Image (cartoon, grey):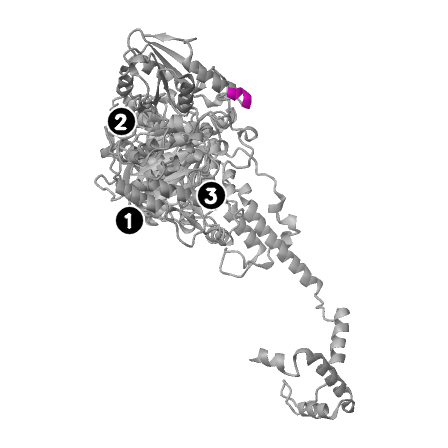
Amino acid sequence: MMKQYGSNSYLFGGNAPYVEEMYEAYLDNPGSVDDNWRDYFDALQHVPATDGSDSRDVAHAPVIESFAQRAKANAFAHKASATDLAIARKQVHVQSLIAAYRFLGSRWADLDPLKRAERPKIPELEPAFYDLSESDMDITFSASNTYFSKAENMTLREILQALRETYCGTLGAEIMHITDPTEKRWWQERLESIRSKPSFTPEKKKHILDRLTAAEGLERFLHTKYVGQKRFSLEGGESFIASMDEAVQRAGTNGVQEIVIGMAHRGRLNVLVNTLGKMPKDLFAEFDHTAPENLPSGDVKYHQGFSSDVSTVGGPVHLSLAFNPSHLEIVNPVVEGSVKARMDRRGDKTGDQVLPVLVHGDAAFAGQGVVMETLALAQTRGYYTGGTLHLVINNQIGFTTSDPRDARSTLYCSDIVKMIEAPVLHVNGDDPEAVVLATQLAMDYRQAFKKDVVVDIICFRKLGHNEQDTPSLTQPLMYKKIAQHPGTRRLYGDKLVAQGVLPADGPDEMFKAFRAAMDAGKHTVDPVLTNFKSKYAVDWAPYLGKKWTDSADTALPMTEIRRLSERITTIPPTFKAHPLVEKVIADRAAMGRGEINVDWGMGEHLAYASLVASGYAVRLSGEDCGRGTFVHRHAVLHDQNREKWDTGTYVPLENIAENQAPFVVIDSILSEEAVLGFEYGYAAAEPNTLTIWEGQFGDFVNGAQVVIDQFIASGEVKWGRSNGLTLMLPHGYEGQGPEHSSARLERFMQLAADMNMQIVQPTTASQIFHLLRRQMVRPLRKPLIIMTPKSLLRNKDATSPLTEFSKGEFRTVISDLSTTLDASKVKRLIACSGKVYYDLVKKREEKKTDVAIIRVEQLYPFPHKVFANELKKYPNLAEIVWCQDEPQNQGAWFFVQHYIHENMQDGQRLGYAGRPASASPAVGYSHLHQEQQKSLHDQAFAKLKGFVLTK
C-alpha cells in the first residue's frame, strides 16, 4: 500500500527533489515560497520531532555538507593507541600460529618408533616466525576459534602447549586439505578437545595389551615351530591388530553388520587368527601340509580368504577377508565391488550396514596405480560404498627400498588420498592407545560423513620381506635400530605396570596364557559365533557342481516378447527424445511386432527385460555403456528439452514391470582395472545379478590384465570361488588400427583351462539374446567372455526374425545356412568365428563353389560333439580350413587347431587362412588393411599352403 501511495502522491516519486528544494528554501526564508506551500510547511513545524522535542527543523543541506567535509578530513577516524595496535597485530599472529599447527603440525609429530630422522626445520611452527617471543607467552589472547578449553581466552603459553600436544604428539593429523568447513571443524573439535590423547579405562588398556599379546604371540609361535617357512610376519606392526579389533567393535556399535576386508600378505595370517577367529589348529595344518587339498590348484596360505561372525556390543558382525594374489593393491576394487553388492542386497544406500576396510603397505599404497583408480570411484554414483576405512601398515620399507628419495615422490605414502580429500591420521605404532584412538576417530568420521579416511600406522618390519630374507644386506642402519627395539608389547606392558593397571608379572602371565591357547589350537577371538547365519547370506550351493553342457530354457513365449517389446519402446508423452533416438525406438517397436528383423541392440534389450521381469537383476557398467560406444544401445534416453543438467533421463528397462528386479546401467570413470575389479567383486558376492563390464573397445581390456589373470581366469581353481561376471569386448577387424581392432582373444584362449570360463563370439541378435539369458537361467556361474561386434551391430545379415527368440537356444556352432549347397559335393569346410563369416559367404557367392562354411560361436569350452556332427554332414570332406581375421599368432588359431584335429577323420587335412603373424594386432594403413582382408578371403578358398596338419 505504501509503495503504491509513494508512486502516486505528489510528495513522492518524480516530484520529491522539487519538494525537497522548496522545503530547504522555506527553512532559510519562509517568505521565499508560495503561500500554499508556506502554510503546509508551517504546519509541519508543529509535528513533534523524533526525539520528542518541539524544536523547529533546520536546513538539511548545510548539515549534510558539513558531514561530507568532515568525512573528507578523516575527522571521524578512531585514534587507536600504539599499544592497541600491537596487541591486535599479535592476535593476528597467534591465529596464524594456530593455523600453521593445524596445517603442518604432523611434520613435527613423534611418529617413528625407530626415531631415525631428525625433526625437520619448519619456521612456521616457531612463535618467532610471527614476532612472538618469550615475553608474549603469558599474555592472554582470544582462543575462540579453537576447542582446547571452554574458556574464550588463553595465554600464548597455553595455546602453544595445546597445539603441540594436539598436533605434534604420537598422532599427527592431516585435515586441512578438506574443503568442507563442517568436516574440518568436526576434526578440529574432536582432536583439540582431547589434545589427541585418549582416556581409556584400565579394562580397555588391558584389552589393548591382550590384542598386542595375541599379535606378537602368534608370530613368535610360528617362528619357532615352523622355522624358515614364509608367513610375512607382522612383527613390528602388532598395533595393527589392536586397530582391527577396534574397527570391528566400533563398527558393530555404530550399526554395521558386515565388514569386507582386503589386504596383501603382510600380517594376513595374524588377521585370520586374531581378527576373524580362524582356528589356529587349522592354520597349523596348512603349515604341516595336512590340510585338505580339494582344489585343482589351490594357493599359498597367506593369500587365503576367510569369513566368520563375531560378537560386538551392537550385535553380530559378519567378517569377510577377500582372497588376494600377490599383486598387493589389486584387491581394493574387488572389495569395494563386494561391498556394493552386499549394500544392494540389503537396500543399504549409504553404507550404514556394510563397511569396506582396506589394509595397505606403505610402498604399495604410494606406488600402485590401482589405488588411485579405486579412490576415483569413491564418490561416484555407481560405485559408492559409503566410505572406506584405510589402514596402512607403514613399516617404512618396500622389499629392500626405504630411502625416501627412491620410495616415492610425495612426503607421505598416503598423499594420494588427498585427491578425494580424505583425512589422514598418522600414528606411532609404538603407542597402541594412540592407534586405537585414531581408529575410533576414523570410524566415527566415516559413519558421520560416509567418506574415506586413512589411519597410517607407522611401525617397522622386524624381519625381512619374508622369513628367508636378510634385510641388513641393504638396510644396515635400520636393522641395527630394530635389533635394539624391545617390541611394542613389551613397551606397552611396562607402561601398564608403571601405571598400576597390571601387576609386575601381568604382561608375562598374559603371554603365557596365549601360548597355552596356541598349543591347544584354540580360538583367540572371543566370542566367534559358530551357529549364526544372517538372512542376507547367499547360498551358492545351487550353482556348484554344474556342467556347462547343462541345458537352459532361454526361449520366451511370443506373447511375453511382445509385452516386453512394448515396455521397452514406451516413453513418457512429455519426454522429448532426440530425433535419431526416436527413430531407434520406432524401429524397435516394429521389431517387437515382427514387422522387421530384430537387431543387436533390440536383442540385448529383450534379454535384459526378460531377466529383470523374472527376478534377475542386471548391472551393466563401463565407459559410455548407457548409449554404447557405437551408438547401438540407447539404454538411457535423454530429454532434449530438459532444463537442469541432473534431470531429464529415462531408462525404459527400469519400467518393465511393477515388481521387477533392478536394472542398473553406469557410465564409468575412464578406468579399466579398477572398474573391472569392482565388477568382479560384485559378481563374486551376488550370483543372482547379471553383472556385465563392457570395454569401450575390446583392446582396452589389456589395462585390466591383472584382474583377468589373477581373479577371472584362476579364482575358482585357486580359491574355489565361483563367479558369473560377463565381459563384453568389442572386437573386429574393420580398418580402425592397432588399438581399436582386437580384444585380444588369444589371451583369453591361453588362459582357458579347467572349465574356468566361457569364451564366445556370437554373430546374430538372437544369439546374444539366448547367450545373456543362459548366463543367468542356467545354474552355472562361470565368467563369460563375449567378443562383441562393431559393424555387425547394424548389419542386416546379423539380424534375426522374432521367431528365433521364442524357440531354440544359444547355438555353440551354427551350421552352413546355404539352401543350395549339396553336402555330397563338399570337399572343403571353412570353420570360422565372428564377423569374417559374412565376408566368406559373400566370397563364396562370387566364386560359386561347393564349400561349406560354419561358425564356431563358442570357442571355449570347445563344443566337440556339435563340431564333430557338423563334419559328419559332409561324407566326402577332405579339407578343413580355419579362417580368422586376426594374425596367425593371435586370435583362436593356435588353440582351436588341436580341438579341430581331435574331431577330424583319418586322411583329412587342416589348414590356416588369415593374416600372417604380426607383432601388432592390426595395421594402421587403410590400403594395407584392405589388401590383407582380400588376401585372407582368397586364402580360404585357395589351395592349402604353409602349415598343414593331416590326421
Which region shows up in magenta?
Answer: 925-930
Dominant secondary-structure state across the stretch colored magenta? helix
Q: How far apart are marks 1 and 2 (CA)?
A: 31 Å
Find out whether residue 929 is within the magenta segment.
yes
Q: Indicate the amino acid at tag 1.
A: Asn
Q: Distance between the residues labelled 3 and 2?
A: 40 Å
Q: Residue 659 carries which label?
A: 1
Is 296 displayed left or right of 886 in the figure?
left
If you read the primary sequence from the N terminus, does the residue marked by circle 1 or circle 2 appear first? 2
Do callouts 3 and 1 mark residues in contact (Cβ within 8 Å)?
no
The image quadrant of residue 22 is bottom right
Image: 234 above or below 65: above
> In terms of secondary structure, where does tag 3 sit?
helix
Q: Quadrant of the C terminus?
A: top left
Q: Mark 3 or mark 1: which is in front?
A: 3
Q: Which mark is residue 580?
A: 3
